[in-house]
Amino acid sequence: MSLGTFPLSYCTNVHPAQTVAQVIDGFDRYTLPIQQQYGKPLAAGLWLAEPVISELMQTSDGAKRLSEELQKRNLICYTLNAFPYGDFHSERVKENVYLPDWSTTQRLNYTINCAKVLATLMPEGMQGSLSTLPLGFKGLAHSKNFEEECIDQLITLAQQLDELYDETGRLIRLAIEPEPCCLLETTAEAISFFEKLRAAAEKQNASEAVQLCIGLCYDVCHQAVEFEEITTSIQVLHTAEIRINKLHISCALHLEDPLNNKEGRKALAQYVEPRYLHQTMAQMADGTVHRMADLSQEFIDSPPSPFDLATAWRIHYHVPVDVETMGGLATTRNELKEAILAIKKLEYAPHLEIETYTWEVLPDTAASLVEGFGRELTATQQLIDDANKQPEKPEPLLII
């Protein structure tokens, strides 16, 4: 199966935008120059924060006018990042990015409105996707029935997405994005949750809507940080018949033998910054993984037990996907290559989107955001082209 014939997408959550005017300004300031740098058609994977969605919904033609702005620039949009709800570029984002969580009506209503907007934005004949948070963050307080509340909200969303499909002919799928230290972070946790979601949907006569409209956003950085074997992870999701609606093309940082690698830890200290969470995982010699919710200078200077005995650390820090090293640190680009090869075996084509939202906080970056994304897109397209040249296997990996 081909990895898709539609243009490669990049996620615009890297650009600050709290109004429709700022979103449109981003097309001219960033997206068009990035496309020129890339030299090929480009899709804008829009991040439309809640204030932007509310502004668009205030008038009956708000989404249509935004669609016209895309068309004027020969840009298309088939996917939205509906994960960050508020200001993703405030001085401190950290755990606030997981609020409101999936137990709340705010999250449900925002996501439904994102779907309605996307139904207008996306080209005729294409399907759409919405990536979203993995229920909530483990480090925040939740109600006793939190998971059940999330399931009820997701079933309601699936039913409304199914109704939207009937009304408009536009199929939009939700893509739940597992992330380190969240309620859904590992492949096993995702599968367990989908079993519960499907059981509840069956009781509510909503099985078809949930199966059609609810799947995963597979962020390669996130699963690599968990030290998961990427090909196996995707195969296990295949067995569980969980559809990958979107692949986030992303890379994490990797530090080998951290206790004895003082130069590596010194390099890592440059990545301590106040805006985003950088969950840090340690793999032990026996394969077990330990978690730290955020990276700090104190942690790097004096790694606590058992992190001091780890064979390697991986850090949730989205770094440019075209490089294998970053200032003395390795990246998980090999895992990205594995993911693209595994995704190619599917009998459908997930949406492919580069999500390097950290350009504003990357240390010592010589390239501009436009130059950097141009390189990322070119390198990713080469990986896709190389994967598409691979001979087909007799047995496909997944049929849904």
Image: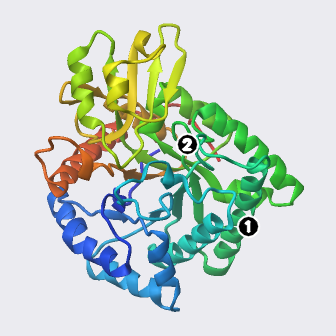
73 sits left or right of 387 in the view: left
Checking the image for residue 232, the label placed there is none
Q: Residue 216: give x, y in percent of width and height.
A: 58, 48
Q: In this view, does 369 lie to the left or right of 19?
A: left
288 relative to 102, above or below: above
Location of residue 265 by image quarter = top left
Please determine whether, in this image, residue 83 is positioned above or below residue 362. below
Would you place residue 232 above or below residue 133 in this image?
A: above
Of residue 181 and residue 158, the one placed in the foreground of this image is 181
Q: Which of marks 2 and 1 is in front?
A: 2
Q: Earlier in the sequence, mark 2 or mark 1?
A: 1
**Element under disc 1:** helix
Give the percent coordinates (x, y) of residue 50: 49, 71
* Colouring convention used in this rendered image of the protein: rainbow
Residue 312 relative to residue 241: left or right: left
The location of residue 180, given as percent across then percent down, is 51, 36
Q: Is mark 2 on a helix, strand or loop?
A: loop
Name, please, the residue furthest toward the bottom.
60
**Outermost left residue:** 366
Q: Position of residue 373 (x, y in %)?
A: 22, 52
Residue 2 appearing in the image: no
Q: Quadrant of residue 45?
A: bottom left
Residue to which mark 2 is pinned:
178
Crowd around label 1: few <14 · some 14–19 · many ≥20 (10 Å):
some
Q: Name the residue under label 1.
A: 159
C-alpha gap between disc 2 and disc 1: 22 Å
Query: Which residue type does callout 1 highlight?
Result: Gln
In this rendering, the answer to whether 173 lies above or below 291 is below
Residue at position x 40%, y 59% from top? 88
Proximity of marks 2 and 1: CB atoms separated by less than 8 Å: no
Q: Which residue sits at x=38%, y=17%?
A: 312
